[in-house]
Amino acid sequence: MAEFTPMMQHYLDTKEQYKDCILFYRLGDFYEMFFDDAKTASRELELTLTGKDCGQEERAPMCGIPYHAANMYIAKLIEKGYKVAICEQLEDPKKAKGIVKRDVIRVVTPGTVVEDNLLDEKKNNYIMSVYKQGIFFGASVCDISTGDFLATQIKETNNFVKLLDEIARYYPAEIVVNSMLYSCTEEIQKIRERIECYISNMDDADFSPDIDNLKDKYEIINDKDEKIDNLNEKEFAVAAINGLLKYIKQTQKIEMEHINRIKIYNTTKYMALDISARRNLELTERMRDKGKRGTLLWVLDKTSTSMGGRMLRRWINDPLIDVSEINERLEAVNELKSNMMLRGDIIEGLKKIFDIERIAGKISYGNANARDMLSLKSSVRKIPELKHVLENVNCGLLKKLYTNLDELKDIHDLIDKAIMEEPAITITEGNIIKKGYNEEVDKLKSASTDGKTWLINLEAKEREETGIKNLRISFNKVFGYYIEITKSNLKMVPDRYIRKQTLTTGERFITEELKEIEDTILRLTRKISRPRIQIIFRS
């Protein structure tokens, strides 16, 4: 049997590692899919199915999408319940020896989506892990886009019924389970019957009982926001947490630095509502079409921010049963209802605040742009005003909010010092970091400007030396920098000119000096155009 081509063999080796995903394989300006993935994507995305020579007698089924439109197609696949592995080119194809080095940089799953256009701004997108050991369960949930991370364990009677209640509480987009639970087909089937979500299986060994790593990296708190020192009593919750953290790291390929606080709660803190009760009560979605209009959430949701909308949804899904906590909330509501001036000032202040939680998540994820940073600065600037409004409140909950509200002045000052007032829209354009903030960036910008001056001087020098008055130095993305000479002046071209391209109107040339300047300018431009937003927080 004939061997596959080197590129196709690498594709197959990569696909072997991500069997449960549709593999987006970067080839130039396209993400290509092959074999069964191509057939699936062609059907689900309504793409034309073609073929590619792969070293075999039959051509490999193939379909592709432009890389700049990937998010739109990924969104459709995620909505249909698929996982997508993105295999990127890790080196410049022009400089590669042999096939271009490629690897998977991220796996997008229903529970790990972070792109704004794929998320409901007033709804958390949870991924859940469930660890089963005997008749006991540990469960943890995380919203990667905001950093919210919670966990619990179930060690009572009717444990599986209580687990179903916890799953219904969060309605996760994806559930990760250990092998023991996955092998219980009856229980898995009951989960599938009650909630439509993607279920992934991981080995029991991935659900580690290790507590030292958790204590070193994360702040572990209880229902009352108090630090938990003795995690040995939470062994099932710990296993679920470790399993979820490992899955997130495996799929996202980066450290999620904004996930730094984990709350381990007691299931008895909240009212137990099974999925049928939640559905029949229409708390957050209608039975008929899962819409929001007409639900309890729709009636109550007058929140001014996305963060407030998500919190209200959580409160409705997690009814309190502790009388003192209920009364604490009611006292706060009563004060806000009675004091129209206070309520109005708070509403006006909140209207000017962007989604700080998700901006922080984007920064940690590495896909924030300069406009996100300015939105964060604008939001943080309003916090002192908001805190001042709360200065003379009377009830305990609002007083607690006033005391604990961090004005984040250091963050505001850092962004103000680092980011231009009118930065480029995308990171790759450069023009983001203010002059004087980072010495290396200042040097690069200065050198880049000098490079353009070199070109102007070189053009003047070449005109004088050759006597060609209309000689000009230009640039395009395909050929780089070149000297263009019209046909009428070709007889005056010196021997040191190296022909680069022939046109109907003349010819284009390069010289050793121009090539050196080109290399310098492009190298500096690439370095300037690749600043990561994290430079602001790490300089």
Image: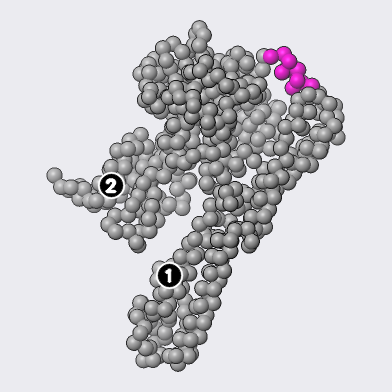
Helix, strand or loop under label 1 = helix
Q: Nearer the viewer, mark 2 or mark 1?
A: 1
330 in magenta:
yes
Q: Amino acid at mark 1?
A: Asp
Q: Position of residue 214 (x, y in %)?
A: 51, 28
Q: Position of residue 269 (x, y in %)?
A: 63, 16
At x 34%, y 87%, the residue is 495
Which quadrant of the structure image shows residue 323? Answer: top right
Q: Main secondary structure of the magenta part?
A: helix
Disc 1 target residue: 519
| Residue assigned mark 2 | 10
Magenta residue span: 322-331
Residue 413 in view in this figure: yes
The answer to whether 123 appears left or right of 108 in the picture is right
Give the secondary structure at mark 2.
helix
CA gap, disc 2 and disc 1: 32 Å
Across and down, in percent, residue 362 comes to: 56, 43
Name the residue type under label 2. Answer: His
The residue located at (46%, 53%) in the rendering is: 68
Q: Nearer the viewer, residue 362 or 111?
A: 362
Left or right: where 207 falls relative to 148: left
* Residue at the image point whose x is 41% and y is 45% from the top: 105
Q: Quadrant of the N terminus?
A: top left
Q: Is residue 39 visible?
A: no
Q: Which residue is more in the foreground, 227 or 481?
A: 227
User: Which picture quadrant has residue 387?
Assistant: top right
